[in-house]
Amino acid sequence: MKLPAWIAALLTALLPACDMVNLPEIKPGITTQAEVRSRMGEPGFIHRNDDGTVTWEYSRQPAGVHCYMIRFDRQEIVAALDQVLTPATYARVTPGLTQDEVRRLLGQPASRQTFDNLGESVWEWRIEGDFRTEETFFSVHFDLADGTVRKAGQRIQPRP
């Protein structure tokens, strides 16, 4: 069942408020997977780490500007909670990374577009900007031939 647009908009507006209440209660070394699921709901994606642990992704895209990665240790206790849409993470997106590696760094993008004539796919995340009159996006351009990053950078546009 598809939600009416006004309900979807209301829920999107309330997500940051829920995060403000729930995130401070998630404590590394203490909070369990069950407690995180109870507070945050089902993760949008589960990343399986090479060491046998997992990272749960809670992306607030396309309307929000955050993506939370919650990493659990082997005992299913929170090891780390990070908001990954930050300048430090953007700096890690370099030419040659694969789409899977970028997804693991930044989470689900707000949009994906393919430009056959340019031979690239562009993923964008809505991110925090400096001014309320603008919308800021982080864009990653992937080569269609090999699926790796060509370039990345920010794009700013006036709010409608």
Image (cartoon, grey):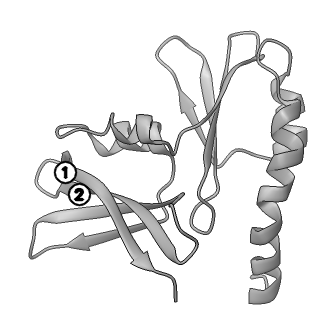
For badge 1, the amino acid type reads Lys
Residue drawn at point x = 86 percent, y = 53 percent = 18
- Residue tagged 2: 141
* Residue 82 picture location, percent across and down: 62, 32
Residue drawn at point x = 74 percent, y = 88 percent = 5
Q: CA distance from mark 1 to mark 2?
A: 5 Å
Q: Name the disc covering residue 151, or none.
A: 1
Count of marks placed on residues: 2
* Residue 81 picture location, percent across and down: 68, 28
* Residue 129 picture location, percent across and down: 50, 61
For badge 2, the amino acid type reads His
Does the residue at mark 1 contact the one at mark 2 (Cβ under 8 Å)? yes
| Of residues 103 and 124, the one drawn nearer to the viewer in this rendering | 124
**Labels 1 and 2: the sequence-earlier one:** 2
Q: Is residue 83 left or right of residue 143?
A: right
Location of the N terminus (image quadrant): bottom right
Quarter location, residue 22? top right
Q: Is residue 62 left or right of residue 58?
A: left
Q: Is residue 1 visible?
A: no
Q: Is residue 84 left or right of residue 124?
A: right
Characterize the local packing of mark 1: few (<14), some (14-19) or many (20 or more) Cα atoms within 10 angstroms: some
* Residue 154 picture location, percent across and down: 33, 59
Residue at disc 2, secondary structure: strand
Residue 132 vertical placement versus 93 (above, below):
below
Characterize the local packing of mark 2: few (<14), some (14-19) or many (20 or more) Cα atoms within 10 angstroms: many
Residue drawn at point x = 84 percent, y = 57 percent = 17
| Of residues 58 and 153, the one drawn nearer to the viewer in this rendering | 153
